[in-house]
Image: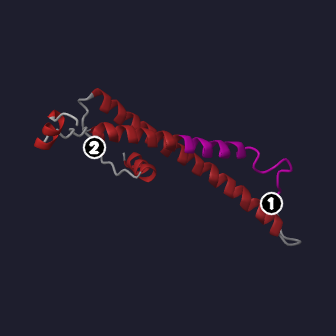
Amino acid sequence: MDTILAAIGKYTDHTVTPAELTAGSDDPLRAKLAHAVERAAYAVARVEEELGQVTGWVTDKTVRVRLALTAHPGQPAPTLNPLGELQAHAARFDALISERAARIEHLQTLVAVWAAQATPPSTPARHTPSTTDRTAAVQPAT
């Protein structure tokens, strides 16, 4: 639950507690929205976790290339793949970045709808006509 709440807070500027997510669970719409918010936040966390793993792999490959470039004569240098070091993960890396953006946008939309649903509508102020309003309506035009 901490991961979910952290994602909500990080990307939507809403500080949400577990109690707030479950509040109003007797209202089917609010309950479904809260569940959707949780799932969307979890999806953001999962894609970020995978992106972190791929980022680590890309970093390792970059270090390998740097070692190969900076090796001095007589010093062992890592062998580089002549077809490209990033070919296996570069497309996945870019796809995860795009997917992360889409999931964050989805989370932001759901939280906005959920927050609007959680806020009771304000009661419109009743307008009581003043004496001036009534006399102005009754007086004939000149």
| Residue 140, image quadrant | top left
Amino acid on which the number 1 mark rests in the picture: Pro
Residue positioned 31% across, 41% down in the render: 21
Q: How is the image coloured?
A: secondary structure
Residue 94 seen in the figure: yes
Element at badge 1?
Answer: loop
> What residue sits right under mark 1 in the picture?
78
Foreground residue, 40 or 71? 40
Relative to 67, say whether 20 is above or below.
above
Q: Indicate whether residue 93 is drawn in magenta.
A: yes
Q: Residue at x 67, y 45 (%)?
A: 94
Q: Amino acid at mark 2?
A: Glu
Distance from Cα at disc 1 to Cα at disc 2: 54 Å
Identify the residue under disc 2: 20
In this picture, which residue range is highlighted in magenta? Answer: 78-102
Which residue lies most toward the top here?
Answer: 28
| Residue 48 in the figure: left or right of residue 128 | right
Q: Is residue 104 magenta?
A: no
Q: Position of residue 46 (x, y in %)?
A: 51, 43
